[in-house]
Image (spheres, coloured by chain):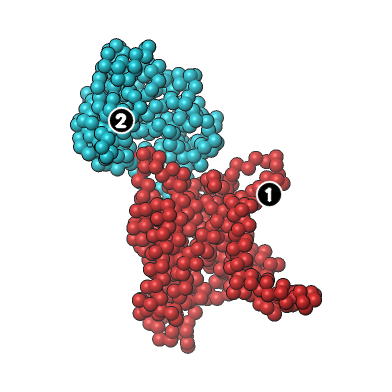
Chain colours: A cyan, B red
Amino acid sequence: MAALEVSGLKKSFGGLKALNDVNLTVQFGTVHAIIGPNGAGKSTLLNAFVGRLIPDAGSVVFDGISLVGKQPHEINQAGVVRVFQTPEIFGELSLLDNVLIPAFSHRDGEFRLNGWSRAAEQARVHEVAKHMLEDVGLYGKRDMIANSLSRGDKRRLELAMCLSQEPKLLLLDEPTAGMSRADTNSTIDLLQRLGDGKVTKIIIEHDMHVVFSLAEKISVMAQGAIIAEGAPEAIKTDPRVQEAYLGGAHL
Amino acid sequence: MMNTLAKQDRWLLIGFTLALLAGPILLKPFGAGYPDLLQKFCIFGIFAVGYNILFGLTGYLSFGHAAFLGIGSYTAVWSFKLLTMNVLPAIILSVLMTGLFGLVIGFLCLRRSGIYFSILTLAFAQMAYNLAYSVLTPITNGETGLQLVKGDPHVLDRWFGVPLVEGIPSTNFFGISMVGYSGFYFCAVMLIISFYVAMRLTRSPFGLMLKAIKSNQNRLKYTGVNTRSYALIAFVISGCYAGLAGALLAVTDPLAGADRMHWSASGEVVLMTILGGVGTLLGPVIGAGVIKYLENIFSSFNEQILNGVFGFLPDAIQHPVVKFVGLFVGEGWELTLGVLFLVLIIFVPGGLMQGLQSVQRRIFPAQPNPAAESTRGAH
């Protein structure tokens, strides 16, 4: 069953065709990696999914809902959650607050006027936040200010924030960039056990170790279009991919 | 209801209440223990606490909040004129009216953020000021200001058979006259309620979302939150607080003038909030108190008093000194405010609350302060 269906997606910035007729089908519950050289249009593609930019043509349908033209918060409420390339966190707030915010958003929807109940008393939501922080190994730092974290920890915090929303589709834009090898491996572990095949994941990644550890299917992008698609083993040996992206790198 | 507050909040509220109610005694040594000034502390405290809900939590810097103060005052005076001299309907109507205005103005201004939002609010406040000053003279009585006159209808008072007095009646709360200390205590109770509400809002999930808007609005959007709705409600709530403050100004002195909406009044509440500590609960109240106190002290000085103070100096020095110091007092007291503000922003950018906390930490270094009071982000 297809969770996400993208067809004929186009976006130009002036003369540059950032997305040139992208067609993509992501199966429900799978991990789908998108790889390609810098400037291939991978991040632009994610931007079109989450409402950051409006495509010139084409459609993005998630779970039967068209995402094109929807506001970012509506897309998120539909279950599409994004981890950004540079961590987007609430820098001045505590780690716990950082995770409580998406957890409340998941429970209360896009807007709810609950100005009278204390945040600290929302036991159920607190339970989720605690659990998520434990999962990424940050619970001990829950009272710290998020800006004081290292870059790798910020990434893990953002991941915890996104997971606390129980996403249906998780978009990961280079989730391990800037992490140590050990942190990268623990993030791979976390992503593997996450969701039990119920969460669909799209992952953009340059680290081939991560890609081949996680992905069940790989799409290769170059110059705004998908040039190859298939199982990891097939992609590894595809000559077009070797030429366009890997440049003969050893895999 | 009290047991739903965390421990430190409960103590903060109790301490705040006691300090406020004991205000006439506590502030007597400072020459501020009289109702006229104490009322001002409370009223502008409410104004600043409400302003802080918008500016302190969401980070949206409104430069037009005095418009709500004015709208509150006009509504209250009209309620006195047409309905009753009882203050309760006046306050309720003022809050509703400012809430309505807040909804419309907020809806339009919140289409932009940052400096553009500030400019839009300033533009609206300036429009309100000019409308009140000239165009809407039938409603606002223009330059003279709206005041009670003999022969006002007081419809409700007539219905309920409140005995009419000769001349202009005074405002009352079910018979308790709002003059002198009863006026102060009425304002004090209003401030305590306002403070409690602000505390609850700040500590709620709603308050958390407002803080998230200030911290990273973009992330919040991609977290599924309709940030504009939250900001709008915060705008309306802070407008209502300003409306309440405006109504109380009319309660203690039943007249309303366009000057109340002047941009400098909007600027003043920004100063109060920053002076006390942006985003803290107590800071804005302290900031409002300090500014109103200094205004009272410095604006009352004149050349005669200064000559008395510097009388010990030889004439040749006394005259230039009095001339120079004279620039900072009386009409020019805002110059003093400016100097104070410069010193504070440079040396204690977090405001008085931050200053107090660092003093506390220096005196009790062993006790880790869990930032019980602070909700402030980094500056």
**Identity, as a three-letter code, of the amino acid under mark 2:** Gly
Q: Chain of mark 1?
A: B
Q: Mark 1 — residue?
A: B359
Label 1: state its secondary structure.
helix
Q: Is residue A234 visible?
A: yes
Q: Which of label 1 and label 2 is nearer to you? A: 2
Q: Residue A251 appears at what percent x and percent y? A: 37, 12
Dot 2: within a 10 Å radius of its alpha carbon, few (fewer than 14), some, or many (20 or more) residues?
A: many
The vertical placement of B193 against B71, above or below, is above
Instruction: Locate residue A183, reporting x and y percent.
Output: 48, 22
Quarter occupied by residue B271? bottom right
Q: Residue at x 62, y 74 (%)?
A: B330
Residue that protrudes farthest toward the bottom in the picture: B166
Residue B211 pos. (x, y %) = 46, 46
In this view, the residue in front, B272 or B328, is B328
Give residue B123's position: percent from left, percent from top: 39, 64
